[in-house]
Image: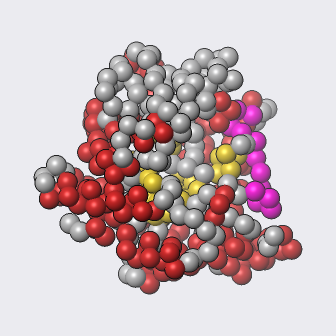
Amino acid sequence: MDLREVGNLFMVGFYGDRFSAEVKALIEDLNPCGVILFSRNIQDPVQIAQLTHDLQRFSLERGHNGLFIGVDQEGGRVRRLREPFSEFPPARTVALSADAEGSAREFARVTARELRLVGFNLDFVPVLDVLGHPDALEQSVIGDRSYGSDPALVSRLGRVVLESFRSEGVIPCCKHFPGHGGTQVDSHKELPMDDRTAEVIEQNDLVPFVDAVEAGTEMIMTAHILYPFLDRDHPATLSHAIISGLLRRRMGYDGVVVSDDLDMGAVANQFSTAECALMAIQAGVDIPLICNKPEKAFAAAARIVDAIKDRDVSKSRMAESLRRIKTLKGKYAASMNPSDVAAVHRRFGANAEA
């Protein structure tokens, strides 16, 4: 397998708010399955629609089946698209509202429609992390991004969001498996450890993910957290026991698994981004996510090419992930078309351009 074949596993971030020569070369030379956009890439509705249009058109013109174009639009403090896009409160506020399911459904449907309009086909929601204790809101790094400490409530509202996004043609991605709600350390900076027993994790944190798998969720994101009672040596993203063992075999999940950003300190402080990507693939992850410095994605893809030559990764293992990615794109083929920039002008009117 060559670099472009392996590159098709990756989802990448980049800098700039236009389809520049550098972005064009990234898509052409690495051939990633998708891109993730951040506030740094977003100015106003028309600009973002034009950018996603150009990305998607270029991919399709090259004979590919489109790009995943993803974003973190959770509501609350984690939202990349600001006014004039609709704004919603954090998940915890939704859960405490008089009609929690109705509020969750409204958030998901409105958000999905606006995302789809400007060219996104993937949102990294719902957050299925269960807070470790009813009073853990301030102590947990996830905090109000979680629906709360009741696994049944998190599961129920997560499923509402999951199904509502699907109904609007936007892929939902459940996160952060097997659960980020029991830690106080920010995995962006260093490696958190959750030393609760496997039984406690199964009875609490896994409940929403089990339900999501039963509901047929198409994508799950991993957590950069060490769970000693599940794997003493590797954080979940890099753990064969957790990804291939727990998620794949025990829970029966055959959808797409995407890593959290491999540039985050929790894993990047221990290994190079290239080694993290290789270990994630070996663990059972399908899409290594690299949000910064596109050159790291090229180095990671080259590292995996070498590992295949050295038989540290089998071609059949690569084929599994490529199959899952292709299947998901086929299911959402209608969402892989370039955005209609004129429709964005009509929708947002005078607020279309900042």
User: In this orientation, does residue 255 appear?
Assistant: no
Is 224 on the left-hand or right-hand side of 151? left
Q: Is residue 92 magenta?
A: yes
Give above or below for 118 relative to 124: below
Is residue 78 in sight in this rendering? yes
Q: Where's the N terminus, which quadrant? A: bottom left
Residue for point 42% across, 22% down: 202
Q: In this view, which residue lies farthest toward the right?
A: 350
Horizontal and vertical percent for residue 46?
72, 74
39 versus 212 height, above or below:
below
Instruction: Write the residue at 69% across / 73% down.
Output: 47
- Residue 237 lies left or right of residue 250; in this view the side is right
As displayed, is residue 206 above or below residue 195?
below
The answer to if 348 sits in the magenta stretch is: no
Instruction: State the residue in front, 286 or 255.
Output: 286
Q: Residue furthest bottom?
A: 61
At horizontal 44% and vertical 84% (from top left) the residue drawn is 61
From the viewer's side, name the closer residue of 149 and 36: 36
Residue bounds of the magenta highlight: 82-93
**What residue appears at the point 75 percent right and 56 percent down from the top-left corner?**
82
Point out residue 310 in the picture as x, y percentages from the top left corner.
Answer: 13, 54
